[in-house]
Structures are given as C-alpha cells and as structure tokens.
Image (cartoon, rainbow, N blue to C red):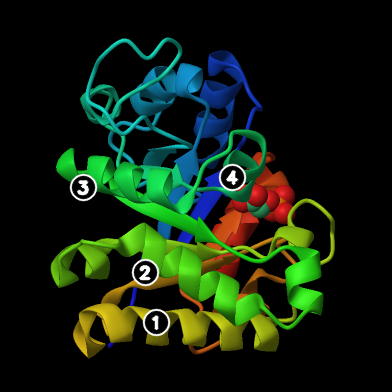
Amino acid sequence: MSRTPIIAGNWKMFKTAGEAVAFANEVKGKAEIDGVESVICAPFTALPALADALKGTTIKIGAQNLHFEDSGAFTGEISGVMLKDLGVHYVIIGHSERRQYFAETDEIVNKKVFAAFKHGLTPIICVGEKLEEREAGKTKDVCKVQTEGALKGLTPEQAAQAVIAYEPIWAIGTGKSSTAEDANEVIGYIRSVVAGLFGEEAAAKIRIQYGGSVKPNNVAEYLGQSEIDGALVGGASLEPASYIALVEGAK
Ligand code: PGA
C-alpha cells in the first residue's frame, strides 16, 4: 500500500499575516511537487491571508489547534466550524506544547479529533515520550496510551484518514533528533497499535510522520524508512528555501 508522504510545517507562534503571504509567494510552485503533500500549519490570525495567497496551488493549510465545541461561551477559542469556513484542511491536535503548557489530556485530544472529523478537517495527532520516559524504557507504552486515547471511538475509515505525528519531546526544537531507524521502529509500533484497534487495512492506510528537529539535510533519511510517511517540522519550516528543500527531500 503506498501512502503519499506529507510534509507539514508547524509555524507555532511565528509570523504575522503579512509575513505569511510573503512566504506563500516564495514557495508557490516550488513546494508543489507531484507525489508529496505540502501543508502549512499557521497561527489562526494568518490563516485567512494564507488561504487567499495559496488559492489555486496544491499547498494545503492547517491550524494548530481547535476547540471541541462548535460554538459557545469559550472566550479566546476557535472552533472547527470557523476553520472549515476559512478553507483549512488540517489541524494539529495534542502537540506536546499544548499538552505541557495548556494541560491537554488524552480525553481532550480525543474530543478535538472528533470535532475535526465532524467538520471535515483532517487531524494531525501528536504523540511522543518525554526524555525521562525514554530513559525508563517507556517510549512504546506512552505512545500506545496516547494513540489509543486519541483515536478512541473513531470508525476504521476515520482512523485510516487521520495523520499521526510521532514527536519524541526531547527532540523538539533541541537539534537532537531521533535516529531514523529508531523513529521507524516506534512508528511501526504505533502502526501496530492502530492495527489492533481498527484492523490491518486502516493501519496500512494511516499516515504516520516523524517530528523533532527535522531539517533539509536529514528529511530524506527519515522519509526513506519503510514506516515513516512524512514529517512535522517546526523551526526548519519557517524559511521559504528551507521549506521547499524539505518538500523536495520527501520525494
Ligand atoms: P522542530 O519542531 O522541528 O522545531 O523540532 C517540531 C514540532 O514541534 O512539531
């Protein structure tokens, strides 16, 4: 089963709307490569301008979070309805920074995954272990609990459509990336967890990315692994030339 590799930039809390448009104008055409899906997950405030600037291109836009309710008295929050209305395709859910700084639990992540599907958004669900968990030999256990928690109650068809990003927390923004072989092994394990929950077909279809200090010079090594279907990239997705090189490296 061939899975289309997906390179998703996670801009985090960087770039104004104007900066996002300038970026879009630089990468248009160049980060559009047959056989690779290019995604940019921008701050909410940049999404309308980015959607406009990327109209007519194959580059898709993503958000970095959503609330699980459609509307209501939730000051400061953004819902799936609102994102869909902007032409957003993807939404990152359960990034380790949201789990750590905004107290997102597996239950909240699961509700957000349901909200994404309800509005036709594809979730990019982040899982991954902390350094002390890795050192205690708990990497697979942590990934299993988070994967099961996030996907609980989905249909096999929904699970097949989802994207998971395996991001060891100690590798995010640190320059310390997991070896490609090691990431491949954990991702293969996560795929087996999906198979246990939803069957072999869903497991063969679901795309699982690696994330954590992916750069233009190591992206091909990760993507060359049998189980790794793409990358979720923070720092190296912020410069147009670097983003283009990441997409090219995924081919
Ligand atoms: P990084 O971030 O590429 O800067 O390590 C990855 C992420 O947080 O998704």
Q: Foreground mark, 4 or 3?
A: 4
Please state which amino acid type lies under the numbered disc 4: Arg
User: Compared with residue 245, is residue 148 higher up or lower down, i.e. above or below?
Assistant: below
Per the image, the residue denoted by label 4 is: 99
Q: CA distance from mark 1 to mark 2?
A: 27 Å
Q: CA distance from mark 1 to mark 3?
A: 20 Å
The part of the image, by quadrant, that contains residue 200 is: bottom left
The part of the image, by quadrant, that contains residue 49 is: top left
Residue 235 placement, left or right of 63: right
Per the image, the residue denoted by label 3 is: 117
Please state which amino acid type lies under the numbered disc 3: Phe
Identified at 36% across, 27% down, the residue is 51
Callout 2: few (<14), some (14-19), or many (20+) C-alpha neighbours within 10 Å?
few
The mark nearer the N terminus, 1 or 3, is 3
Q: CA distance from mark 1 to mark 4?
A: 21 Å
Picture quarter with the N terminus:
bottom left
The mark nearer the N terminus, 1 or 2, is 2
